[in-house]
Image (cartoon, rainbow, N blue to C red):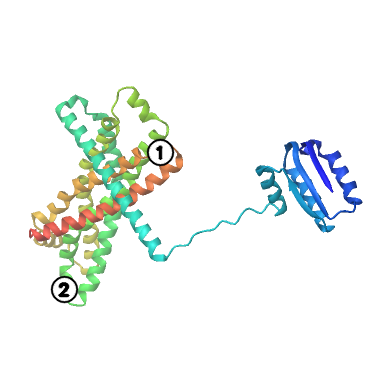
Amino acid sequence: MRIVAAGDWSIVHLDPIDRQLRKLLAAPPEARRAEIDFTDISRFDTAGACVLARTATFLRAGGLAVDLKNISEAQRILIDKIGRGGVPEPVIHLSQPLYIEFTGRVGEAVRAIGGEALGMLGFVGAVVVTAGRTIVHPSRFRIVPFMHHMEKAGFDALPLVCLLTFLIGAVVAQQGAVQLKQFGAEVFTVNLIAIIFLREVGLLLTAIIVAGRSGSAFTAEIGSMKMREEIDAMRTLGLDPMEMLVLPRVLALIVALPLLTFVANIMGLIGGGVVVQLMLNMSPGVYIQRVQEAIGFWTFGVGLVKAPFMAATIALVGCRAGMAVSGSAESVGAQTTRSVVYSIFLVIVLDALFAMFFTAVDI
């Protein structure tokens, strides 16, 4: 039995062909094998493949051996898909040993860290070059953006910094008084508050607040400008984005963070003093005297020395993340998250390095 398929086998012209095939299959001739020839098919789609696949299935059910002649590769793929009900080929996932996957992930992480460090080093170099050019030509410095970011990163952050450091100072004083009272040394609670806050907690807490508040704002602002192609427009106009956007933010935060740290230290001492007065019945005059006896110049100066370095780290990470935005809103969110995480991580690492350095030099 030989069936020659010719002409247009698309869904538009398929109805009369389908009726002819159904009549043929209703009373098939006596034969032991069937042959379907695809040579003269001019157009072939899924509907035509369904009709021919159904015809071949009926013939095989009648005991005939069916052979498809002169079928093209595309037609065979379509017939095979119809025959399997449209089920795609199973995807074979090559499984690897756990140690190979672990080693690969470690390698990818190390490579990503190396690339990030290299990119950050290049960005710091560009900022340093821009700062040197501004020192040589002071008229290039953007005083208005500098003052604006001083207000946004410094003055506007004061309420939050004051509230949190006051509460943390009160908590440290309360916990210190409870623990030291067991040894009859509750009077040294003042020493605990003064040293912890002035050397570490005041600056670290302020830096983390600024990283989450101002660092993320730097990334979002610059990233939004990058997404809207405003930075490309600035370059087209002959303006340097490093001078216009990055340098004022970095310098503003370098100036603002030591001032915020000073206020945070004072508020922490006030919070601790309130708790000491309530729990230990220590008058404000005695508390101030004990604070003066407990601290020296470097106890107060250590925190202020670290503040500019942490401010530069936060600002540089935030600005670089903003410049790395690829042009979509999703990228802005991802880079903002990365800038906050990296800033807080680097601030803590930097604080630990400074702590080891000051301990080594006996300060």
Q: Which mark is residue 326?
A: 1
Relative vertical location of residue 156 with respect to residue 166 in this rendering, above or below: above
Circle 2 sits on which residue?
A: 185
Q: What x and y, as percent, mark residue 44?
A: 73, 39
Give the SS element for disc 2: loop
Q: Is residue 104 left or right of residue 191?
A: right
Relative vertical location of residue 47 with respect to residue 345 in this rendering, above or below: above
Where does the C terminus fall, quadrant-wise? bottom left
Closer to the camera in the image, 177 or 83: 83
For badge 1, the amino acid type reads Ser
Residue 198 visible in image: no
Kindly identify the residue that appears in the image at 21 percent across and 55 percent down. Answer: 351
Q: Residues within 10 Å of mark 2 (few under 14, many from 20)?
A: few
Kindly identify the residue that appears in the image at 25 percent across and 58 percent down. Answer: 271
- Mark 2 or 1: in front is 1
Q: Is residue 25 left or right of residue 220?
A: right
Kindly identify the residue that appears in the image at 23 percent across and 61 percent down. Answer: 272
Work out how far the residue at label 2 is from the one at label 1, CA to CA, in angstroms: 58 Å
Relative vertical location of residue 187 with respect to residue 205 in this rendering, above or below: below
Q: What x and y, as percent, mark residue 238?
A: 30, 23
The reply to whether the C-beta atoms of the residues labelled 2 and 1 are less than 8 Å apart is no
For badge 2, the amino acid type reads Ala
Q: What x and y, as percent, mark residue 324?
A: 35, 40
Q: Residues within 10 Å of mark 1 (few under 14, many from 20)?
A: some
